[in-house]
Amino acid sequence: MPYKPQQKFTSRTQDVNLASGWEMKLVQAEAILQGAGSGDFNHALDLINEVHTRNISDNDSNPLPALTAASATEAWTELKRERRIELWLEGRSAADERRWDDLSTPGTLDIPDWENPANPGYTPLFVDNPRDKLCFDIPESERDRNPNVPTSG
C-alpha cells in the first residue's frame, strides 16, 4: 500500500480550524439520529452524505458515491465512520467513542482489524497489547520517569 502523507495542514502558518462547517453537519446528523430512534433517519444520512460526497475519488476524479442506510443503526455506523474520517487529525475520536459508549448508540465503529494475522497490516504489537476502546495506556516513558505509576506487566 503506498504511503500518502496528510495534506490537511501544509505549512506552519496555515489556519487551523477549531471546528468546521463540515463537522457541524455531522454534529447535526448525530443530534437527529439521537432523536430519530426507529423513526426517520434519512435527514441525518443526507447531512452525512453532504460531507462524504464533497470528497473526490482518486480513481476517476468523481465525487465519492453517496452512502446508503436501510435503518437508523446503519446510519449510525455511517456517521461514526464519517466522523473518524473527517476528524482524523484532530485527536478527538476518543471523546466520540466515550460519548457513544455512554449513550449506548447503535451501529458499529469500524476499526482496522490489526489483531488478525490474516490482515496485511497485522503486527504482534497489537496482539500483545490489546486496544482498550476507552483509554490509552500510560506510555513506558512516563512509567520510567514517574515512581508513582506502576510498571506494566
Image: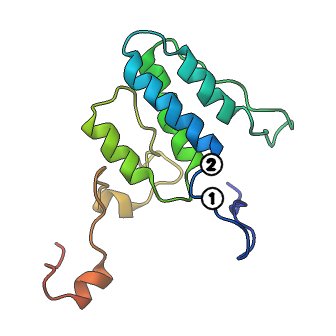
41 and 75: which one is in front?
41
Image quarter where the N terminus lies is bottom right
Few, some or many residues within 10 Å of mark 1 (<14, 14–19, 20+): few
Q: Where residue 85 sits: x, y (%)?
A: 58, 45
Seen in the picture, residue 57 relative to 37 is either above or below; the reply is: below
Q: Is residue 87 left or right of residue 103?
A: right
Residue 125: name its quadrant.
Answer: bottom left
Image quarter where the C terminus lies is bottom left
Seen in the picture, residue 146 relative to 90 is either above or below; the reply is: below
Few, some or many residues within 10 Å of mark 2 (<14, 14–19, 20+): few
- At numbered mark 1, what does the secondary structure look like: helix, strand or loop? loop
Q: Is residue 18 left or right of residue 139?
A: right
- At numbered mark 2, what does the secondary structure look like: helix, strand or loop? loop
Q: Where residue 79 sits: x, y (%)?
A: 51, 32
Q: Where residue 148 sits: x, y (%)?
A: 13, 84
Seen in the picture, residue 34 relative to 153 is either above or below; the reply is: above
Instruction: Name the amino acid type tagged 2.
Output: Ser
Instruction: Name the amino acid type tagged 1.
Output: Asn
The residue lying at 86 percent from left, 38 percent from top is 61
The residue sitting at the top extreme is: 39
Please say whether residue 40 is visible from this viewpoint: yes
Contact between labelled residues 2 and 1, with CB atoms less than 8 Å apart: yes
Residue 20 numbered mark, or none: 2
Q: Which residue is mark 1?
A: 17
Q: Is residue 59 left or right of residue 52?
A: right
The residue lying at 38 percent from left, 25 percent from top is 34
102 and 133: which one is in front?
102
Please say whether residue 115 is visible from this viewpoint: no
